Each structure stands twice: as C-alpha cells, then as structure tokens.
Amino acid sequence: MRRVLMISSFWPPRVVGGAESYASALATRLRARDIEVGVVTLGVDAPDVVASVRAWPYMADGTQNPSRLAWAALHARDLYNREARAVLARALDDFAPDVVHSHAIAGLSAVALRLPSSRGIPHVHTIHDYWLLCDRSTMQTESGPCARQCVPCRTISQVRTLTTRRHAPDVMVAVSQAVAREHGRLPWVQRRLRVVPNPVEAPLGTARHAAPRPDPTFGYIGRLTDVKGVDVLADAFDASGLAGRCELVVAGRGPLGARVDASPKGVCNLGWIDDAGKEEFFERIDCLVVPSRWRDPAPLVVNEARARGIPVIGARIGGIPELVPPGSEALLFTPGSVSELGARLQSFAAEPTTFAPPEHDPLPGWDAHVDAILAAYGDAGVP
C-alpha cells in the first residue's frame, strides 16, 4: 500500500472537534510508515490537502451565526452535494489512492461515503459522531439527549441510507462501544462494523502527572457550549463551596465564554490555548472534568488526561464511561445534574489521592492503533 486519501470536513489548522485532530495525527503516523496521505476537505486549505470543496453557504465551524435561510441551504446541500461529487471524483483520479479513509463528513453529503466504493476503491469510514442518524450529528435537542429518533432525523437517515447502502464503505470503524450501539440500528452498517478505540498516548517527553495536591485544581478544556455542559460545571463549582479553597481552570472558546467569566472567584478562564498552552493546562490541574450533556462519542481529552495519569470526573453518557481511568469510575455522574457534579467535586477535594489512576495503566498506544487501522484497510480489500 502506497497511498491513503482521507476525507474530512475540517483539518488543521481549522479544528472544530476531536475527529479532525485524530485524523491528522493518524496521517502523521501513516507517513512514518512510508504511506503517502492526501486529504479532501470542506473549504480548508493546508499542506496535506489535495482537493477542497467550496464551503457554501458558510463555514460551519461555529464561528458564524447564520440566518435561517443559510442554515437551511447548508443542510439541503448536506443531503446531496453535487460539487463534492465532482471534487472528490477528480481527487480519486489524480491522487489514485489504494484506499480511502473517511472521517467526519458533515457538509460533504453521503456522496463522500458512496463514491469510492462505487469505483471499486477500498473504503474505510470511521464513525466519529451521529451524522448517519441525526440531522444535527449530535442526537441532542435544546432539552437534552434524544430518547428516540424524531421524524425529520429518521427521514434524513433513510435518505442517507438509500444513497449509501449499495456502495457503502467496506469497513465501518466506531470509536467507542457507545457509538457502535447507536449505529447498530442500521443493518447495512452493522455487518461492516467494528470498534477500534482511539489511542491513549502522551506526547514524547511528557512526564506522568504528580499526585494531586490537598487543595486540588479542577480543569475543563474544550468548546464552551451547552452540550458540553460548561454551565453545569460552573454552577456545580459555585454550589460546591470549594471556590475559596480550590480553583477551576477553563480553557476554550464558545458562546458560553461570558457565562464562565461571570462565575464567582476561583474560576480562571484561559480562553483558547495552543498545544503548548494545553501542556501547561494539564500540568496545572489535578483533575479533569468532562461534563457533557450529549452522547459524546469518545472525547479525546479524556484519553489525554488518562495518558498523563490525571483523574477524570465525567458524565455518565456516550463513550465517556468507557474511557475514564481506572479509579475514576466512582466519579461518574448523571449528565446535567448540578447537585451530583458538585458532590463529585467535593468527594475528590476531600480525598484526591483516592482517585489516582494506577501507576501501570494498560493503555492502547498509537503503534497498536495504526496496526488495527491497517488491518481494517486490508479487510476492505487493500492487498
């Protein structure tokens, strides 16, 4: 195998979530094994990118507040994107990949799933979200996680199924058991499905975190949005009575930034941070908090904390319970519950060393992960 063509709506330096960060990291590891990697994106230009589909009517990266008309146009284009078909067809011809590996493809439409296989090219798709099941990709409404598929999402899911199933990817990789369970309702996905968890590996030179301090510092890093539960965390920290003794450090940006800034003393908002700032963030905190309200498929930040030996207080939803370090299971809480999260913060502050991960935590690293991905390529038909 010589060439892999990746398809991803976003790509560094334009990063919206963990999917593109993971895909970029995987590309780096594949190149280390003498495999050439090219990327097709949605409006992102970068050294890796061999082709890009125009981002119209707007770049859906959370930096814009579109009108209802623009929002409707984007979602209509996501059902069938004629331009994506033309751009991807040229990329397949010009780059001539041995295998296509697609990731989060919102905005590119199901064309990105069906075109490679329709041309007889081996195709692996990693399921990072719920795009095949939900118009929003989150299975979440303003009132909380969806108990069942609503009629519009069921209709859209059926359209995507009809578009894809005759020429579906050969292998579908789920990033967690939680994601696999949700997609198991689609028969054409189920028979192609396997779970390959994201790797857990700290950057070279990163030391294991020291034992938690008696007055611990809690941390949150990610988008400052309601589905991520940042408001729940701020309210829980306020209600816990720990503000005079402990600190909460928040890193990220989003519509709830002002809500974080308005928190009482003891809360430090770092705003957006780069990779160097992320390392400083992890060195500063004693416990990571992941308060997601939505079915977070497999948040990379949990793995990043675990790789550094940092305990995690996580919401009991999505893939989070699968990922938290051993010793942190007792810190799981009901998503959206201010009282439960406040109690977990208090429990950790009372006896922080009780929840420290074991010294020798068996973690799936990048080498084993790349081996599993290469095996998926082989099962898809790569010689």
Image: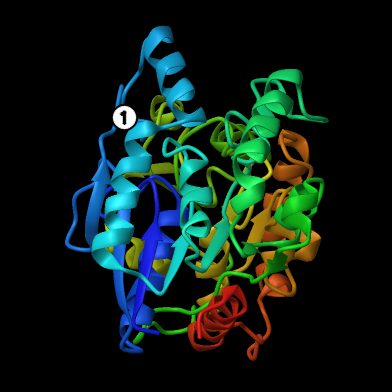
Residue 249 percent location from the top left of the image: 44, 49
Judged left or right of residue 74, residue 304 is right
> For this rendering, which residue is in front, 53 or 249?
53
Q: Position of residue 383 (x, y in %)?
A: 50, 86
**Relative side of 255 to 149, left or right:** left
Please count the marks in the image.
Answer: 1
180 to the left or right of 13: right
Can you say whether 101 is above or below 16 in the image?
below
Does the image show residue 77?
Answer: yes
Disc 1 packing (10 Å; few <14; some 14–19; many ≥20): few
| Residue extending furthest toward the front | 119
* Vertical arrangement, residue 100 with respect to residue 188, above or below: below
> Label 1 belongs to which residue?
63
Quadrant where the N terminus sits is bottom left
Question: What's the residue type where badge 1 is placed?
Answer: Thr
Residue at the image position 65 percent from the left and 33 percent from the top: 134
Residue positioned 76% across, 36% down in the render: 339
Asked if 338 appears above or below 189 in the picture, the reply is above
Q: Position of residue 31 (x, y in %)?
A: 31, 81
Q: Residue at x 68, y 72 (%)?
A: 325
Closer-to-camera residue (122/323): 122
Quarter-of-image position of residue 231: top right
Q: Is residue 351 visible?
A: no
> Relative to 342, is 327 above or below?
below
Q: Quadrant of residue 337?
A: top right
**Tag 1 secondary structure:** loop
* Residue found 61% across the figure and 64% down from its top: 170
